[in-house]
Image (tube, coloured by chain):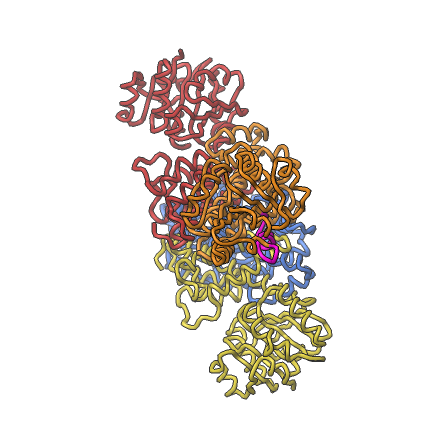
Chain colours: A blue, B yellow, C orange, D red
Amino acid sequence: MANLGFVGLGAMGGRVTKRLLDAGHTVTGYNRTKSKAQGCLDAGMRWGESPRAVAETADVVFTMVTNTAALHEVFHGPDGILAGLGEGKIYIDMSTVSPAASRHLAAQVAEKGARMLDSPVSGTVITLEQGNLSLMVGGDEATFERVKPILLDIGPKVNYVGENGQAVLMKIAINLNLQVQFVGFCEGLFLAVKGGVPVETALEVMLNSVIASPSLKYRTPFILDMPEEVWFNVNMMQKDMLLAEELGRELNVPLPTVAISNQILTAARAMGLAKQDFAIVYKVLAHMSGIDM
Amino acid sequence: MANLGFVGLGAMGGRVTKRLLDAGHTVTGYNRTKSKAQGCLDAGMRWGESPRAVAETADVVFTMVTNTAALHEVFHGPDGILAGLGEGKIYIDMSTVSPAASRHLAAQVAEKGARMLDSPVSGTVITLEQGNLSLMVGGDEATFERVKPILLDIGPKVNYVGENGQAVLMKIAINLNLQVQFVGFCEGLFLAVKGGVPVETALEVMLNSVIASPSLKYRTPFILDMPEEVWFNVNMMQKDMLLAEELGRELNVPLPTVAISNQILTAARAMGLAKQDFAIVYKVLAHMSGIDM
Amino acid sequence: MANLGFVGLGAMGGRVTKRLLDAGHTVTGYNRTKSKAQGCLDAGMRWGESPRAVAETADVVFTMVTNTAALHEVFHGPDGILAGLGEGKIYIDMSTVSPAASRHLAAQVAEKGARMLDSPVSGTVITLEQGNLSLMVGGDEATFERVKPILLDIGPKVNYVGENGQAVLMKIAINLNLQVQFVGFCEGLFLAVKGGVPVETALEVMLNSVIASPSLKYRTPFILDMPEEVWFNVNMMQKDMLLAEELGRELNVPLPTVAISNQILTAARAMGLAKQDFAIVYKVLAHMSGIDM
Amino acid sequence: MANLGFVGLGAMGGRVTKRLLDAGHTVTGYNRTKSKAQGCLDAGMRWGESPRAVAETADVVFTMVTNTAALHEVFHGPDGILAGLGEGKIYIDMSTVSPAASRHLAAQVAEKGARMLDSPVSGTVITLEQGNLSLMVGGDEATFERVKPILLDIGPKVNYVGENGQAVLMKIAINLNLQVQFVGFCEGLFLAVKGGVPVETALEVMLNSVIASPSLKYRTPFILDMPEEVWFNVNMMQKDMLLAEELGRELNVPLPTVAISNQILTAARAMGLAKQDFAIVYKVLAHMSGIDM
C-alpha cells in the first residue's frame, strides 16, 4: 500500500480520497476549507497543514481542484505543492486545466527531480461511487506504470494517452460533447413535446434509444427533477467549452457545434442560471420554443 | 402465430421479416426488386404479387421503405396496400416519414375500417441482429395491445408513444441526435488528434467515456475503417434532418445544433460523398481542420 | 409608350404600377381584392376582370404576388394569365419564388409562343418611392432588351443576370443577407447596450459605420420604433430563408450563417411574432441576453 | 494648431499622421521600426526617440497599434508613454483593445493628472484617404470637446459614445459585423454561382443591392482580385472576434452568428491562410461547396 497525499477534497476529490483509503492506502489530505474534510478525516485520512506539507509527507500526491486559478493557488508559493516536491516523488493532477498549463507545471515539477502526470477523469460523482470512473493519464510512461495500480483503485478504466497535457486534452475533447449532446437532446425532446408527446414519455423513449449515452442517462432526467446539490454548473461547463474553443484556435480545429451550444450556456447565464447544474440550459431552449417549463 | 405481410425487404425490412419467420409467424412478402427477396424466400417467406395482394392475404401488414415517395408508391394505386386493406386489418408502417404524412395515411386506412400504427425503430442492422432493437408505436392503444406480442418478436423494447404520427415524431427527435452527436464527437476527436494524440487512442478513450452512446460506439469506428456495405448514407441522414427542420418550423422549435450539423452533411455532398455512410462527414471536419485523413 | 398589364397590386405591386402609369404607359390591372386597387384606378389604371383578361389585353404583363401558391393561383386555370398569353407577348414575374418554379412557368409560357422573364427587385417600398429600386432579370436576352426601357421606368438599376430562374436565384442570394446582417447587427448592438452604451447612441454609431448597408439603415431603426404597417414579416423572411436552404441542398452549398439565423426567426414565431416586421427578431436576441426591450 | 504626438506609424497610423500634418498640426512621431516612418518624416513629422519622449513633447499624444500586447509595450516601462504623461496632457488610443484593458490604462493615466480617450476608427485605409473615416470616442466629455477639432481633421464623423472603454466596445460591436456580413455574402454568392450565374455578375448584382454595406463594397471584390498588400488579415479579424466573444461571456450576450462565422476564420487558418486579408475566408466556403476558386 502506498503513502499518498490529496489536495482538494471537494465533491469529487473527497470521494476519490475515500476510495483510496478504502483500498488500504495511507492518505494525507488538505483542503482550503478544513470543515469540508471531515468526512475524509472520519474515514481515516491524516491532515496536512498545507499543500506543501502534504507533498513533503507523501510519495505520490494528487490535486483535484476547480480551475487553473485554484490549481496555481495550491501549487505555487511557499506553502504550495511544488515547494514540497523532491527527487523521486510523483505528482498527479486530476483537475481540468488547459494542456499548456499542465505542461508548464510538469516542466517545473521535473526541475525538482519529481514527475508529474495529468489524470483527469470522465464521469460523475455517481459513476465514481458505482466504481465505474474512467481515468486518462498523460506524462512519462514509466511513471504511469508505477502508479497504475493506485489509479485502478480509483476506477476500473485507466487509459494511458501520451505525454504531459494530453490527458487533459482528451478530457476537454470529451467534455465538449457533454454540452453538445445535451443541447441536441433538448432539441429533439422539445420537438416531441410540442408535437404532443408527454415530456416523460419522450424522455423515456429517447433514453431507451441508441443515442442514450451514459452522460445523457445521468443528466437529462434533471429536466424533470433538478437535484438540489449541484456538482457541475453552467459556469463550470462553460469553462470547459472555453478551454475547447481556445484549443480549437490554437490547433486550428473548427468547432461548429461547440461554438453554437456554448452560446446556449451564455443565454442561461443571462437568465440568471449560472450556478445551477448545466442541465438547466433546457430552460433556454424551452423558452425559445415557447414552452413554459 | 399470426398471419403477417411485409412490404419492403431491404437491409432492415428483410432482417425484420426473418425475425418474424424465426418466431414462427407466417409472412407473405413483397419487394419491388424480387431478387433481393431471395433470402427471405429461402427462410420460408411466401411471395405476394403486389402490395395489395400482401394486404389482402395478411391480417397484419407491415411496410418499411426508404422515404415518403417510396411509401406512396406501395401504399396508393390499384396495386397498393390501401386497396387490399379492409375491416379489422392492421397496417403497421416502420418507415421514417413525416408525422403529417403518417397521420394522413392513418386516416385513409381508418376509412377502410382498418387501423394503422406507425412503428419506426431505433437502432441499426447490428442492433436488430443482436435482438436489441427498440420500437416506438403511435396510434390507437387497443390496436397496439393486439399487435404488441408480434412487435416484441422484432425487438425487446416496445414503447407506446401516443396517437398516430407520434412514433415517427419520436424517431425523428432521436435521429437528429445521431448527426449532432457524431459531429460533436469529431470536433473533440480532431482537437485531440491535432494536439498530438494518435487517432486510435483518442477514439478508444472517448468510447470508454460517459459520452459513448450506442450509436457513437457503433459508428465512430467507421472513421478508421469504413464498411463496404452502406445502410444509412449521407442522403438518408439528411432526409431525416430535413424532416426535423420541417417539424421545427411547423411546431416553432428552434434547432440550432441540428441546423449547423446539417450543413456538414451538405458539405459532404459537395465533396461527392452522398452515397457513403453518414460517418463520412468526418472528412468534412477533418478537411476543415487541415487533417489529411 | 407600352400597353402593359399588372396582376398583384399589393404594397409593392401597386406602387410599381403607379410608377408605370406616371411614366406614361397604359396599364390594365387586376387584384384579388379589388378595393385595394382603388389608388391605382384613381391614378388612371384600367381594370381587368381576371388575370387572363389582363394578359389578353396587354403586350407585356407583370405579376407581383406573395409566394409560389399565390402565383399559381393567378397563373393557372381558365382565368389565369397563361390562358391569356399568346404569340409575341411577354410575361414578367416580379415575385420571389424558387428558381425551379420560375423555370417551370417559363417553359409553359414558351409553349404558347410567348416569353417569360423573372424580374424580382431588391429594395423596399421606400427604395421604390425614392426611385432607387434595383431589378434583376432572368430569361432570353433579346426579350430583356425589348422590355429594358420599361423596366428602367420602375428603377434605375436593371441587371441582366442570365437565363430563366437566375434572377430569382440572385434575389434569394441577396435576401438571405437581410436576415444574416440583421441578426449580426443585433448581436453587436446588444453587446454595446449591455456594456453601458445607450441603445440610441449605439444604433447611431453603428449606422455611421462601414457596416451600414441600405437594408440595415432602413430596418434597424425599427428596433426603437416599430412601424404599424408591415411589408415584410417574419413569415415572409422565413419563406425566403427556406428557399435559400432548399437551394443550398439542391446545389450543395453549405449555409452556416443562414442556418443559424433562420432559427432566430423560428424562435420569433414561438414568441407569437410571426406577423410582425422581421426586425422583431431583435426581441429574441434581446431576451436571450436578458435585456428587457 | 496643436502640438501632437503619434506612436505607431503603421498602415493606418502613418496615414492618420499625414492627415494631421496636412491639417497644419505639429506632430512628433515614434515607430518601433524607424524605417517605416520615412514617409511621415518626409511629410514634416519630427522624430521622438521613444514613446516617452513623444509624450513629454506633445500636448496630445496618440497611439495606434496592433493589439493589447503591442499597446502595453509602448505604454508601460521607463520609455513608455505613461512615463511621459503629466498634468493636463491628453492621451488618445486609437487601437482596438478590450474595453477592460482600455479602462485600466485610463485609470493609470488619470493618476498622472492626464486624461485618456479611446478613439478607435471604423473604416479602412481607403476610407481614410477619401476623408470619410468615422471615429468613436470614449472618456470624459469635456476632454472630448477639447480635442474634437483635432479629431475632425482625421475624419468627418466623430461620435462621442460615453465613458472610457465604450468607444472600443462600439468598435468591437461594429467589427464583428465585418466578418458576419462577409460570410453571409459568400453564402449567397456561392448559391448564385453554383446555380449557374457567373461570379462577376453575381458579385455586381449583389453590390448593386440593398445589402451592399461600404465594408462589403470594399472587400468582396477581393474575391476576384486579392490585393497584394494586406491591411487586415485573418488573424486580426479573429482577434476582434475573440474580443467580441469575451465580451459576450462577460456581459452575457449570446452571439450565434459571431460564434459560427468565427469558426470559418479558424478553418482559414487550418488552410494556411492566416496572414492573408480576411476576405480569403471565401476559400473556406467555396471549398465546402465544392467550388474550385
- Residue A128 seen anywhere in this rendered image of the structure: no
Camera-side residue of B77 and B273 = B77
Residue B49 is left or right of residue D133, and the answer is right
Camera-side residue of A145 and D198 = D198
The magenta stretch spans residue C83: no
Residue D201 is left or right of residue B104, and the answer is left
Q: Outermost residue, top direction?
A: D1
Q: Which residues are magenta?
A: C65-79
The residue under the point 39% across, 37% down is D219
Residue D10 in the image, given as x and y percentages of width and height: 34, 28
Residue B140 is left or right of residue A67, and the answer is right
Task: Please tell me whether residue D194 is drawn above or below residue C208 in the rendered image.
Answer: below
The residue under the point 64% across, 83% down is B56
The residue under the point 49% across, 49% down is C90
Camera-side residue of C108 and A191 = C108
Task: Please tell me whether residue A271 is drawn above or below residue B278 in the rendered image.
Answer: above
Residue A111 in the image, given as x and y percentages of width and height: 36, 46
Residue B104 in the image, given as x and y percentages of width and height: 65, 67
Residue A36 in the image, given as x and y percentages of width and height: 61, 48
